[in-house]
Image (cartoon, rainbow, N blue to C red):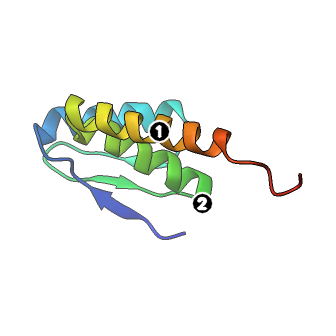
Amino acid sequence: MRSFAFLPSADPATNRWLVYYRLQDLNIACKCASHQPLIIDPQTPYDLLQAWGVCRQVGSSKAELVEWLNRCWQQKATQENQPSPLQ
């Protein structure tokens, strides 16, 4: 897969390092130098999804994350109330 750079909004210097350390924890290849953008090198689609999730978590406000979680719960509740197509 192709490498890409991500520099979250809010406080870029702090957020960049938060993302970098979290991606390191997840064993996703990335590099970061002072005053440079974070370079992420996802090796699999799963790595890319994980990197997206980390960046979203760090780059979003608490209100945005709460709204996203509420939408997920509403969608799950709607799906649970629908009959299975196998029935």
Q: Quadrant of the N terminus?
A: bottom right
For residue 74, the mark is 1
Nearest to N terminus: mark 2 or mark 1: 2
Q: Is residue 27 visible?
A: no
Mark 2 or 1, which is nearer the eye? 1
Q: Is residue 13 visible?
A: yes
Secondary element type, mark 1: helix
Between 44 and 32, the residue placed more toward the observer is 44
Say how many tags the image has.
Answer: 2
- Image coordinates of residue 67 in percent, x first then y, are 30, 37
Residue bearing mark 2: 45
22 relative to 2, above or below: above
Q: Amino acid at mark 1?
A: Gln
Between 48 and 61, the residue placed more toward the observer is 61
- Image coordinates of residue 38 in percent, x first then y, are 29, 50
- Image coordinates of residue 21 in percent, x first then y, are 38, 31
Query: Are there few (<14), some (14-19), or many (20+) residues within 10 Å of tag 2?
Result: few
Between 69 and 43, the residue placed more toward the observer is 69
Query: Are there few (<14), some (14-19), or many (20+) residues within 10 Å of tag 1?
Result: few
The reply to whether the C-beta atoms of the residues labelled 2 and 1 are less than 8 Å apart is: no
Q: Amino acid at mark 2?
A: Pro
Pick out the residue farthest to the bottom. 2
For residue 84, the mark is none
**Which residue: 79% across, 50% down?**
84
**Which residue: 17% across, 42% down?**
34
Gap in angstroms between the C-alphas marked 2 and 1: 26 Å
**Which residue: 19% across, 35% down?**
61
Picture quadrant of residue 14: top left
- Image coordinates of residue 45 in percent, x first then y, are 60, 60
Task: Please state if 78 lies on the left or on the right of 74 as rendered.
Answer: right
